[in-house]
Each structure stands twice: as C-alpha cells, then as structure tokens.
Amino acid sequence: MNLLITGGTGFFGRALLRHLDSEERATGRLPYDRVTVLTRSPHNFSQRYPEIAALPWLSLHAGDLLSPDTLPKADKYHSILHAAADSTDAAALTSLQTYRQIVEGTENMLRFAVNCGAERFLLTSSGGVYGPQPMDMETISETHHAMPDPLNPLNAYGVSKRCAEHLCVQYWHQYGLETVIARCFAFIGQDLPTDAHFAIGNFIGDALLRPQITVKGDGSPVRSYMHQSDLARWLFTLLQLGEAGNAYNVGSDEAYSISDVANMVKTILAPEKKVVIHNNQLSDNVQRSRYVPNIAKARNQMRLDIRISLKQAIEFHKPKGA
C-alpha cells in the first residue's frame, strides 16, 4: 500500500515524516509499503533535512501540483495526503497565487487520485474556512457554516480552502474517491518557524535568541496550540479512518490569551527576559480575536486525544543541558 504526500517538505509534511520515522523506530513497521513526497526541489530538501531525506522508505519526486504533467503518473497509490499550501507557505504568496495554488492544486491532485486508482484522499484544510469566530462562541465546531467574506481579497486563504473542500466532496460523489477534510487550527513544534507570522513561534525565537519577548498586539486574542506530533497522528488517523465526505477539526481546545502564551514561554525558556506588549496589530491574523476549535467530533468518532500539552510543547524547545 503506497502513500503520496504533497506539501511533504513544509511544516505539515515534516511533521508527518517525523511521525512515520518514530512509528517505525517504535514498532519496526510502517502502515505503508512506500511513501512518496512531491516536492519542487528534492535537492534543496535533501540539503536542508538530510536525516529525513535519507529515510529508506521515502522517495522524493520532483514535481509541482500546478503542473499535472510533472506528477508521478507511473506509480499507483492507495492513499494521498494533500498537505500542500499550509499557512506557512501561503504567507509568502499573493492572494491570487494562494487561491490558484489551493483550488487548482487540489483539483489537479483529485484528478490524479482518480486516475491512479487511489481509494483515500485527505485534504488539510483550515479553521480559516469558518471566518471570524463569533465573540460568544467558546469553541467553533464543524456544524458552524459561516465563511470568510469572499469579496475581500485578503481572505483568499480561507475562501480557497472552502472551495477545495467542496471539490473534494464533488469527487467523492462523482468518482467514489473517499475524501476526508482536516480543518487545521494552530500548532507548535520543532518545525514551526521562529521568525515568521506565527505568534508562538516568534515568542520562542525571542526567548532563545533575542533580548526580549515581544507581543506585537495587545495580547488579548485567544488561541490554542497542538503539538506537531499530535497533528501528524491525527492526520494519519483521519486519512485511514475518517468518514468520507466529512470534515474534522484538528487542533487543541485548550485556550490561552496571546499574552498568557508569551508569559508561559518566558517562564519556561527565559525567566530572566521581559515580555513587552505593543498595542499594534497582531502578526498572526488580526481579524481573529478567538481561534479555538471544538474537537468533540474527532474525539468521539475517531477516539483521538491530545497527548502533549502546550506547557510540554514549549519545554521541548529548551536547549540541551538547560
């Protein structure tokens, strides 16, 4: 049984590959005979992450999901995990590029899945498909059918993920491809950038490398964070067992204000440093005052759980010997 992963060289992809490596080390076997990662530059990935690229069961295929002719047509895959265009990559694109990559890229992969005889297809979507979380809603569930304003070009990421979800359901109904949606929220882990648009990543970078921990807003927005090892375990479970045509929230429901997160990072990683709170806009989406999923569906139907708390996840970033 072969698996194809798109986006396998990004944050999500590296989390998935590290999880498979850990599983093989722990059990001596993998759920797949062969794992292929689609990447635009196998050479660059091998140079940056040689320990992952050297895994004996992993193949890197040079290709681009926007160029169907470059996909690995000679091979057959039982499952496809479409993790391209997570929010890490999307941040570097224009709104139109983001829309094209997500919508056209997803349809190209769905068409490829049908043509290669795949049975299962998991789309990593986003909690951004819900639009702003209502102020009186503690956690947002899969039955909340709001969406971002499609007339605002800055909402390209959330709107295009919603369109990609709809494509998945259409391919399930027309071709019988068992498509499952993972609506992913916010994460932490060794592969999260510490100098990008993710607040918690920046706090960790500040604690380890800079003179102070800077909060770029007023600290009041509320977030929750799932560790990347839990993320990978949930995604593989949904790929294998999720109900076709269904969406599942993926994230933690343990909520904290941004200022609380900054102070937790300080306490654990750099107690001697100050937390400085500015009152300008937050770097990780100012429209979201609250961004916390309801994960009862995944817990109840898939028996999934959160194994690593936010405190434990931050502690993993302590320098060795500290």
Image (tube, rainbow, N blue to C red):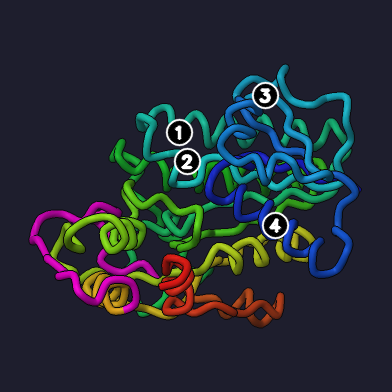
Left or right relative to 102: residue 236? right
Residue at 74%, 32% in the rendered image: 111
Q: Earlier in the sequence, mark 3 or mark 1?
A: 3
Say which residue label 4 marks. Answer: 245
Mark 1 surroundings: few (<14), some (14-19) or many (≥20) residues within 10 A: many
Whether 91 is drawn above or below 282: the answer is above
Query: Is-magenta flag for residue 291?
Result: yes
Q: Position of residue 173 (x, y in %)?
A: 76, 47
Mark 2 surroundings: few (<14), some (14-19) or many (≥20) residues within 10 A: many
Whether 297 is drawn above or below 231: the answer is below
Under mark 2, the amino acid is Ser
Cα gap from disc 2 to disc 1, whole angstroms:
5 Å
Q: Quadrant of the C terminus?
A: bottom left
Tell me the SS state at disc 3.
Answer: loop
Q: Earlier in the sequence, mark 2 or mark 1?
A: 1
Q: Position of residue 287 (x, y in %)?
A: 25, 56
Under mark 4, the amino acid is Gly
Q: Which mark is residue 160?
A: 2
Q: Earlier in the sequence, mark 4 or mark 3?
A: 3
Q: Are marks 2 and 1 in contact (CB under 8 Å)?
A: yes
Under mark 3, the amino acid is Gly
What secondary structure is the magenta-colored segment mainly? loop
Say which residue label 1 marks. Answer: 99
Cα gap from disc 2 to disc 3, whole angstroms:
22 Å
Tell me the SS state at disc 2.
Answer: helix
- Image quadrant in which you'd find residue 236: bottom right
Q: Are marks 4 and 2 in contact (CB under 8 Å)?
A: no
Per the rendered image, the range of residues in magenta is 268-292
Under mark 1, the amino acid is Tyr
Say which residue label 3 marks. Answer: 63
